[in-house]
Image: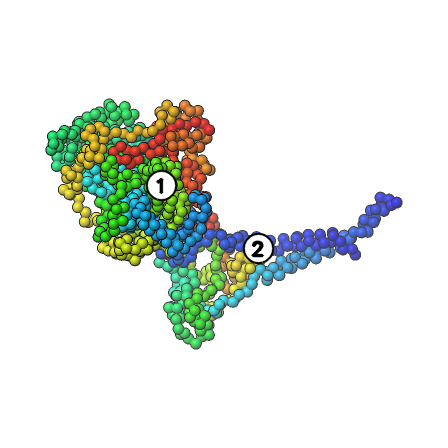
Amino acid sequence: MKIDRRCFLSLVIGGAVGTTLTPVPWKLTDDIAIWTQNWSWTPEPEDGPSKFVKSVCTQCSGGCGIIARTIGNRAIKIEGQPDHPVNNGSLCPKAISATQHLYGPSRIQGPMKRAGERGQGKWEKISWDEAISTVTEKLAELRTRGKPHSVACISDTDRNSVAYLLDRFLRAYGSPNFIRTPSSADAQELALYLSFGRQGTIGYDFKQSDFILSFGCALMDGCDAAGQMMSAFGDMDKKTRLVQIEARLSDTAAKASQWVAAKPGTETDLALGLGHVMVRDGLYDKAFIDSHGFAFEDREDEAGNAYPGYRSLVRDYSPEKVAKTTGLPEKTIESLARAFARARRPVAVTGFSNPAAASVNQALAVFALNALAGNFQKPGGVFVIDEPDYLSWTEMKIDKTASAGNQQARIDGAGTKRFAHTRYLPNRLPEAINSSQGDSPVQALLVAGGNPLYTLADPQSAKKAFEKIPFIVSFSTFMDETAEQADLLLPHPHFLECYQDVPTPAGMAKTVISLARPVVKPVYDTRHTGDVIIETAKNLGGFIENAFPWKNHEDFLKKTLSDQWETLEKQGYWTDDSSRDNSLEKLFRTSSQRFEFLPRAGFETQGSENPKSKVQTVSLPGDVNELPLVLVPYSTIRISGGAVANTPFMTKTVDANVIAQQDVFVEINPETASEYGLSQGDKATLKTPAGNAKVRVNLFEGIMPGLVAMPAGLGRTGFSDYIAGKGVNVYGLIAPAADPASGLNAAWGARAAIGKA
Amino acid sequence: MSTQSDNQTAAAGNRSSGWVVFVFFMIGLVASIISGWVAFPELLYSTKQQPIDFNHQVHLEQMGGQCNSCHFFREDGSFSGSPTLEECKSCHMYPMTGNENEQKFIDEYVNQDKEVPWLIYAEQPPCVFFSHAAHVKGADMQCATCHGDIGHSTSLREYQENRITGYSRDIWGKSMLRLGEPDHGGRHQKMNDCAECHLKETGSKGDCFQCHK
Ligand code: SF4
């Protein structure tokens, strides 16, 4: 008997055949499938009892109430808080998917200092002690050199407790340079101050209004307004008419009763044209104007100088003339004015979640329509909400260095003679730094909230300016575009990990303070910015230390909100529902104690007595022949246009004709596209005075010919690989254009050209 | 010089004959069948003892005859599963009987504030979503229908752990062919078992995403 290879092979074959007759292959296949579920990177849901925490979303200025469901120390799901006065249970996708940011790779996991060149992305971990003492040393050094005013701080709000602490810190330290990042509310708030004499926000009673005239507000397209609008529209009766004035068929326009496609940038003219018809036909609230209006009629001051009033101003805005500017038929203007005037509870809205910047004059012209309708502080009308008063602490004592520093002019030029009533001019900051000879006027920059290197118009020049600042600290929770360029990272916890007060969001018709609470324990080694400020103040000692008698941010917040704290802890929000005074008597705090149609304060700042100069529209830079089209930004609820980028989940919901792979599509009317030989999906180059971009073409009948529209919120470089590198930042293509009345950026678009790539 | 036929004979002489090959084939076949049916199940599972020999019967009597005294639904409707140390401690902070298992529990877990690492016979992988509420409250089913009459047992069975998956042998069942019902009563708990019962009771096996979210 010979045993050879064949025997061995047949043994193996016999074994294989035999094995198929046993349970081994089938059972092993099944077991291996289950074994793959045990791999450490396979996500596993938490198991255990659920807890529900009432809190508030702080990812934009919308202030929506949330309920977070947690199991153990894991946040599982975010839902809308059903009884919250802002959103009444509604939420935008950014909040619904917020846990993805909480646990995602965009987080900065602990304090770090730059290890390579700026922007190189090389970081070295440091301790919190080292981080805070680095800041303290730098600030102490600048003070010793008599340069406290060269410290600037950028934040996305000036209304909450952290902003208050930062501002207080700067004043105690000796710098007037607290700067708020730009938003569509800037012009609105200035107009409110000029015509009402109040610092605060404007609220609209959408739920009770029966005619909403929206001048390009992204009511249903973006964050900021999302929660409020979803809640209001859910409650509205079907008779409410929404008229959307916008050059593009946005979601808001699509849901409106009437879509009025006026040329972009002509909203002010249209508002004055509507005013013309109302005044001409006597369709306005005479009683209100008699008792509370100022500068409606021509007037004379004590010295006998004559000033024209609103009536004379709008005389120049006949429907015929406005039809030419806006591209609308005369008939539409006439009928729109009459419909607005005849509605029982009409309200006109602007500067509320608009994707494009607008001028102060536009805001004033729209306020005037509300004044003509006499709808201030009335159901369905316009309400004025003051700045939060809970954040007021006794004045502090400051030393000589601080008071000398505070008296220096602001670096951004706000509050100077030219822009006396403008509080912040973030868009002028880069220019102020770039144009300075020698050392940068900003020697240390603290960025606490906001993401200026993404949200400022023309971030390229802002980046250049940042290069000249020797010391930049970012308090960002995420590795955003600004943090990438910083020297020191002092990460603030995620909003689901800490306390934060959220004062009344713009647009709300009553005061609503909400409290964000720690839903889970911090996932990373982060520290509340409020705590860092207080600790730095203590380290600096002297008067600065004395100005901060609180243990930490939480202690400050509890003491500050003493009366409301309990309510906030229990129900998550506090409102002044029952205590509001809605009378008109004390509403106006202008020098005339009336609503000023053409504000006196405005005249002073411009040093002009010619009212015509007040209604200058902002013209876009660039040569019309070379750049015959206009690029306008648009918002969509699926892409976050603000400081915090969208979550990857949100990107998944975006249509394939908005983003495909890494390319962004621009919307263009088929008529315009054919002029430039472009068809659907074509790759193209878009050119504006601020730069060039590679885009793709999406033919859209719903956009006015001659325009190119691009979604806001793309073209990120920061956050994570799942978010960065998709499309183009539209604000990077729109250079700022200053509003002559305020100095604020009012570039509503950019001249552009497009060609096949 | 050899001829062609010489070569063939030589080759045949060098090769093992057909029956030898067949014998080897049969050896392979029989050996693999035996090891597949006998050795494989033995090797696949390891036998473990529960950390404490728990007497369900005694507890059931003391707790009013209700499973849900210890295995309860939480307020949000989710099922609590095995009691936590906290829950056991509400009675067994100190020894109540002279039982050695109780003493062991107090010494090793209560005093050291450690959760008992119970081995759970019915544990499913995390990719399976199973709602006790839908079955017990919604369909009014008895615990014993799936878990057997464990409530009246005086001692815990040994736990056979699948060495590959880490889950209990109860899920697949003792029989490799999945024949018969479990000795301890109740049901086996593979996906097909769910589907079979659902088909019978509801007329449909159900959709994938009902259990795999
Ligand atoms: S609108 Fe803003 S505040 Fe509201 S849920 Fe969305 S991101 Fe949060």
Instruction: Provide residue A450's location: percent of width, then percent of height.
Output: 34, 44
Q: Residue at image x 34%, y 43%?
A: A442
Instruction: Provide residue A350's location: percent of width, then percent of height.
Output: 27, 36
Q: Closest to the observer: A686 or B13?
A: A686
Amino acid, disc 2: Lys
How many numbered tags mark residues here?
Answer: 2
Amino acid, disc 1: Asp
Q: Residue at image x 86%, y 44%?
A: B3
- Numbered circle sitting on residue A439: 1
Of callouts 1 and 2, the N-terminal one = 2
Q: Residue at image x 74%, y 52%?
A: A5
Q: Helix, strand or loop at disc 2?
A: helix
Q: Closest to the observer: B78 or B68?
A: B78
Q: Helix, strand or loop at disc 1?
A: loop
**Chain at numbered mark 1:** A
- Mark 2 packing: few (<14 Cα in 10 Å), some, or many (20+)? some
- What is the quadrant of the N terminus of chain A in the image? bottom right
